[in-house]
Image: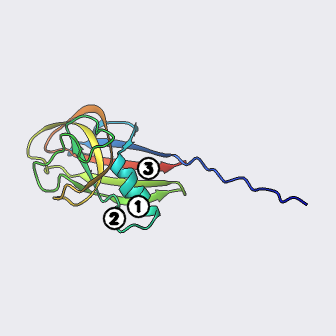
Amino acid sequence: MAKKRMRPVSSGVKVRGSFRLKIVNPDGVIAADSGWKDNQIVDGGFQQFLQFALIGSAGSKTATHAALGTGTVPGASATTLPGEITDAAGCRCALTTGTTGSKTVSFTFTLASGITTAAKTIQNVGLFNGSTTNAGTMFAGNTYATSALATNQAVNGTYQISFA
């Protein structure tokens, strides 16, 4: 009797990301909302945050901070966020993490009002491993329609990475 050959299992896993930013006035009214936008995971993000984590590499990273910027979309090989806001300590925002179901990781952050020293026209966001004062390693980022950010406004952000 011939043995039946097993077919290899193929899951076709894809990684997708999205983000949403809201600029909030001091009275709590939302001044601007980016809506949900697609994300781009950079090459180093795939390698150091996903591949290295799967093999248990000592070099694996986790996303710990978000940054906002005034620049363009980060390229696939980018390591920094173009035009990242760095005019004051605390411009890099600590992340709160969680999961949604079994296939989505969620990150939330707030850039508090009064952190920036001058009004900005923001248009990009990114996730990093680092600290409030250390550039760290970029995981992902992208652009959205420009928004005016006054020094007395806060930014609330949500980032999601989904595996499908």
Q: Position of residue 96 (x, y in %)?
A: 34, 60
Q: Which residue is mark 2?
A: 59
| Residue 110 image offset from top left, x and y in percent | 27, 52
Q: Are marks 2 and 1 in contact (CB under 8 Å)?
A: yes
Q: Residue at x 87, y 58 (%)?
A: 2
Q: Look at label 1 and name its amino acid.
A: Phe
In the image, residue 32 lies at what x, y percent?
A: 28, 36
Query: What's the residue at 27%, 44% (across, down)?
Result: 78
Quadrant position of the N terminus in the picture: bottom right
Task: Name which residue type carries label 3.
Answer: Ile
Spatial CA span between label 3 and label 2? 21 Å
Few, some or many C-alpha atoms within 10 Å of disc 2 (few <14, some 14-19, many ≥20)? few
- Please count the marks in the image: 3
Is disc 1 placed on a helix, strand or loop? helix
Q: CA distance from mark 2 to mark 1?
A: 7 Å
Q: Which residue is mark 1?
A: 52
